[in-house]
Amino acid sequence: MDRIQKIDDTLHAFLSLNEKAVDQAREIDKKIKSGEKIGQCFGMPISIKDNICIKDTKTTCASKMLENFVAPYDATVITKLKQQDAIFVGKVNLDEFAMGLSTEFSAYGPSKNPWNTDYVPGGSSGGSAVSVSAFECVASLGSDTGGSVRNPASFCSTVGYKPTYGLISRYGLISYANSIEQIGPLTRTVEDAAFMLNLISGHDSNDNTTVDNKNEDYLKDIDSGIEGKKIGIIKEMIGEGIDPIVLSATRDAISKLEGLGAICEEISLDMVKYSVAAYYTITATEAGSNLARYDNLRYGYDFSVEGYEFNSYIEKARKKLGPEVTRRMILGGFVPSAGHAGKYFLKALKIKSKLTRQINEAFEKFDLLISPTVPILPFRIGEKINDPVALFLVDINTVTANLTGKPAISIPYSISNGLPIGMQLIANSMNDKLLLQAAYALEKTVKLPEVPI
């Protein structure tokens, strides 16, 4: 908590702090001294993205729309971590309603990259990545709809894990695009990510999309290595538009994997080039539906409107929504509308199906796939904020895992000119254990400097 007080005015990772955190730690100390059974977290300080509900705590989604909303219940992941004696040090910043990939679209101001505060930390889980990278906590929970855990993990040099779709309950996560989003941990090491996955994964009766992972232990045999494993290098993710420095780091990572006994070969997934367009079409449609609840009646502001009239009442509230949320609401209303659904939405669903079929065929030949997490280095705050298309294209390497439901991880790999580069590994559905083993093996080949702040 002292660390947060010392540096967070500069970084702005946190939107609110848990004032009872130290008292909760003292209670756990008492349990330890009295010989009571202690949860596996032993008072581990964890930050939570502010779109995941904690009972009796503000959950704002970094939006003025929910600035006074206090969650009436715990998300399933929160319940599970409380049972293990985790301590939530606070709620962290994000792009408003998790729509963005730089954390610049927070209604409460951007978070800053701890490696260079002139640069974005990535998004939408930027506050989560900053809080872990800058030693303000030991782990964080974020949400990943198109790379929103892996992108900031890459930009801030942390581990970011997006699990198989359904492996972690979404109950208590304020929805953006239900069919592809997942809660995932951001940690300092792959081993910590596996530890977190052990605690928060599994079937949940409150979320019918969850799967039974049979209490898999993701830490067991994490050091098994990857000798003999076949790894596909996704051609479309290291082609046009990639920064030469990122490409060089990727080739170096591939060389190290081969040195560990893996067999690496290039593979083409030609549907990848359509993935960003399909992703934003599908997610905008789902977001438009989910955002319909913010009508100033169920959620929003208690305006006194003279001569109450329904449309003006809603309009007043929605003027408080930020530019990125507004953009996606408008797109989400247009895309599935009469006359356009077949042209846009159904076509996007067909691309999603073809991409899934293509990646499934790839996994008949390969155990894992590799690419840089993001094809560019972190960019300066304000550099791309007025160019939404350029921002959308930053997602090119991460959206495939979400559209196809596959698990993916970003591992800190190198630092170039003071800015981090992350490597992404993707595995087949429910092969999360293999993915963590491969990530652990690659991580052990890297030694990075400490964050300068």
Image (cartoon, grey):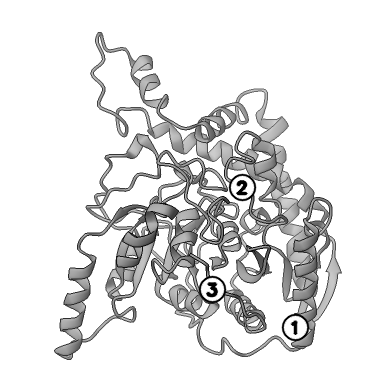
Q: Give the number of the mark in front: 2 or 1.
A: 2
Q: Earlier in the sequence, mark 3 or mark 2?
A: 2
Does 69 appear above or below 148?
above
Residue sitting at x 80%, y 50%: 241
Q: Residue furthest top?
A: 307
* Tag 3 and tag 1, C-beta contact below 8 Å: no
As drawn, the label of residue 422 is none
Mark 2 — residue?
380
Within-10-Å neighbours for mark 1: few <14, some 14–19, many 20+: some
Residue 202 screen position, x and y as percent:
44, 70
As drawn, the label of residue 229 is 1
Residue sitting at x 29%, y 76%: 43
Mark 3 — residue?
450
The residue closer to the viewer here, 405 or 277, is 277
The residue closer to the viewer here, 321 or 181, is 321
Does 320 appear above or below 45?
above
Quadrant (top left/top right/bottom left/bottom right) for the N terminus: bottom left
Within-10-Å neighbours for mark 2: few <14, some 14–19, many 20+: some
- Which amino acid type is marked by label 3? Glu
Q: Does residue 443 appear to the left or right of 217 in the view shown? A: right
Say what secondary structure mark 2 lies in: loop
- Give the CA separation, mark 3 to mark 1: 31 Å
Q: Does residue 131 appear to the left or right of 101 in the view shown? A: left
Residue 163 screen position, x and y as percent:
55, 66
Say what secondary structure mark 1 lies in: loop
Residue 139 screen position, x and y as percent:
43, 69
